């Protein structure tokens, strides 16, 4: 890697962290960077994204707990659902494969982006 690649990777990490901290999808930014700019295979990029997410989520949980903003009963149910989703996702990603997963991810980004754009217009017009 040359200096520009390192700077681009650092910038992508900063943007992904900043976007994730305000709830606008830092993982999407990181996945796009990994797959589009440095040609990381989709499954590997999603694994990196999950590893990137864990410390962010842990810090958010700590800060919210300190401010008494965590409802632990709800959190535990969400944790169980998340673990079930992870297990299902791992199983399905092994069946689907990286190429199809990349296409599904792209379609989901388009659908969510379109929803956000039209949702934004709908919210501002009322």
Image: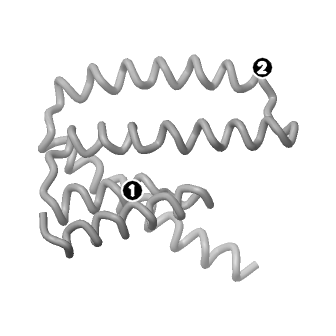
Residue 61, percent across and down? 68, 37
Indicate left or right for 64 with 109 as reference: right
Q: Earlier in the sequence, mark 2 or mark 1?
A: 1
For the residue pair 100 and 23, the one nearer the viewer reads as 23
- Up the image or down, 100 lies above or below 84; here it is below
Q: Quadrant of the C terminus?
A: bottom right
| Figure quadrant of residue 73 | top right
Protein image colouring = one colour
Q: Quadrant of the N terminus?
A: bottom left
Say whether marks 2 and 1 touch (CB < 8 Å): no
Question: Label 2, on which residue?
Answer: 73
Residue 8, percent across and down? 28, 71
Q: Across the whole image, how many numbered discs are drawn on residues?
A: 2
| Figure quadrant of residue 64 | top right
- Up the image or down, 52 lies above or below 118; here it is above
- The residue sitting at the bottom extreme is 125
- Up the image or down, 70 lies above or below 100; here it is above
Circle on res. 28:
1
- Up the image or down, 84 lies above or below 42; here it is above
Q: CA distance from mark 2 to mark 1?
A: 29 Å
For the residue pair 59 and 73, the one nearer the viewer reads as 59
Indicate left or right for 55 with 63 as reference: left
Tell me the crowding category of disc 2: few under 14, some 14 to 19, or many 20 or more residues within 10 angstroms, Cα based. Answer: few
Circle on res. 105:
none
Provide the secondary structure element on which disc 1 rests.
helix
Residue at screen point 81% across, 29% down: 71
Residue at screen point 21% across, 40% down: 44
For the residue pair 37 and 117, the one nearer the viewer reads as 37
């Amino acid at each position: 890697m040359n200096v520009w690649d390192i700077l681009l990777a650092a910038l992508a990490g900063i943007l992904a962290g900043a976007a994730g901290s305000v709830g606008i999808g830092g993982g999407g930014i990181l996945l796009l960077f990994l797959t589009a700019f440095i040609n990381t295979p989709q499954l590997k990029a999603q694994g990196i994204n999950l590893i990137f997410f864990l410390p962010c989520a842990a810090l958010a949980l700590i800060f919210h707990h300190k401010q008494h903003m965590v409802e632990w009963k709800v959190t535990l149910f969400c944790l169980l659902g998340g673990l079930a989703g992870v297990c299902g996702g791992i199983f399905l990603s092994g069946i689907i494969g990286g190429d199809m997963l990349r296409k599904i991810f792209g379609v989901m980004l388009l659908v969510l982006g379109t929803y956000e754009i039209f949702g934004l217009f709908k919210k501002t017009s009322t």
